[in-house]
Amino acid sequence: MPAGSIFVTRPILEEGIELLCGSGATLRVGQADGNAPIERAALLDGVRQADVLVSHLSETIDREVLGANPALRGVATYAVGYNNIDIKAANELGIPVSNTPDVLTDATADLTWALLLAVARHIPAAHRFTVEGHFAIWNPVLFLGADVGPGGSGRRKVLGIIGFGRIGQAVARRGQGFEMEILAHDPSKREEITANPDVAWAEIDELLERSDFVSLHAPLTEKTRHLIGTPELQAMKPSAYLINAARGPIVDEKALVRALREDWIAGAALDVYENEPQLAPGLAELPNVVLAPHIGSAARETRAAMARIVARNAIAHLHGEPAPEVVNAEVYAGTAWRSRRKAWQGADG
């Protein structure tokens, strides 16, 4: 079978590039500037000329993209989330889709805690205050924040986790180190939660009402879109903080801006946004938010491991083999994939 071609929309780390080049495939990168999006026309053109597409979470891989090339063998996304890819269309067209799960769990859980601590203790504002030369003397009321551990009151703080998959569970384990009471809500994990002696199941209303910190780790689906809106924000304690390192549209960002302006809650820390990379009007000007540019998995070792995984998936797609991290494994049992595979094998001669 000839080596084939792989189209990478935007750069990935060199560890993945090395594997892709080592496969003998012809490699093309659509947008060399990693800080700039690939234009839609360039994306479609790249797919038409490739056997395999390597994409990022910032690109919409819809039916038009998937159908642009009848010979496309697979899509490998450089992320764990794949809500930007039309899986239904991929199944109908016989195109396997893969992701990079597991490896970014710890990095994202660590970032969640970095956001939580940063917003609770006013770290970004304190940093600016210091480097701008305003620190003149120790002040007992300067940047008073919230205790995360029991602190001076001795009260265990409550961490509410919505979405108890790998990342949610990793966040919970870290919460134990702060002696927190941990509540979790995830309808798909109810038995697992109730069997965990360190975590208590809670319906979402109870979780919101009781938690000092609410951390979101649910996948983005039609059911979780705007899961946190005006009623939910009003249900939270005025002293509570919201953390989102999952997917932006889980939160109604306009409602969040109002909640922060009107002190419904004490603060929020976000790594993801509803209309990324745009922010809801007024969000950036608020003093009680910490905002990061979607860096949940941005640890050097983690991103390198993700690059190797996406490369191995892409090479499997190229050879017509089941990808190690396929998200729609059912596609391999379908007639569409078998027909597609037979067609490109015939074309390869």
Image (tube, rainbow, N blue to C red):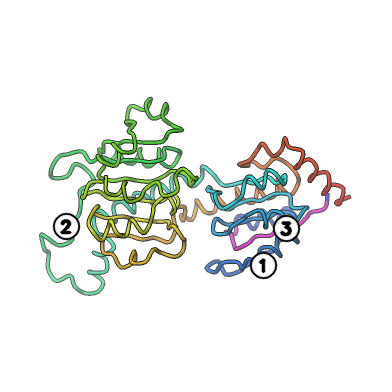
Give the residue at mark 2: 144
As helix, strand or loop, the secondary structure at mark 1 comes to helix
Q: Position of residue 290 (x, y in %)?
A: 32, 60
Which label's residue is closer to the chain start, 2 or 1? 1
Q: Position of residue 304 (x, y in %)?
A: 54, 53
Q: Three-letter amino acid code at disc 1?
A: Ala
- Between 267 and 175, the residue placed more toward the observer is 267
Q: Is residue 45 above or below residue 113?
A: below
**Residue 12 shown in magenta:** yes
Q: Residue at x 87, y 48 (%)?
A: 346
Q: Residue at x 31, y 40 (%)?
A: 160
Q: Assess whether mark 2 and mark 3 are in contact (beta carbons under 8 angstroms).
A: no
Q: Nearer the viewer, mark 2 or mark 1?
A: 1
- Marking on residue 205: none
- Marking on residue 68: 3
As helix, strand or loop, the secondary structure at mark 3 comes to loop
Which label's residue is closer to the chain start, 1 or 3? 1
How crowded is the residue under tag 2: few (<14 C-alpha within 10 Å), some, or many (20+)?
few
Magenta range is 2-14
- Marking on residue 42: 1
Main secondary structure along the magenta-highlighted residues = loop
How crowded is the residue under tag 3: few (<14 C-alpha within 10 Å), some, or many (20+)?
some
Q: Nearer the viewer, mark 1 or mark 3?
A: 3
Q: Three-letter amino acid code at disc 2?
A: Leu
Residue extending furthest toward the bottom: 133
Q: CA distance from mark 1 to mark 3?
A: 12 Å
Residue extending furthest toward the left: 140
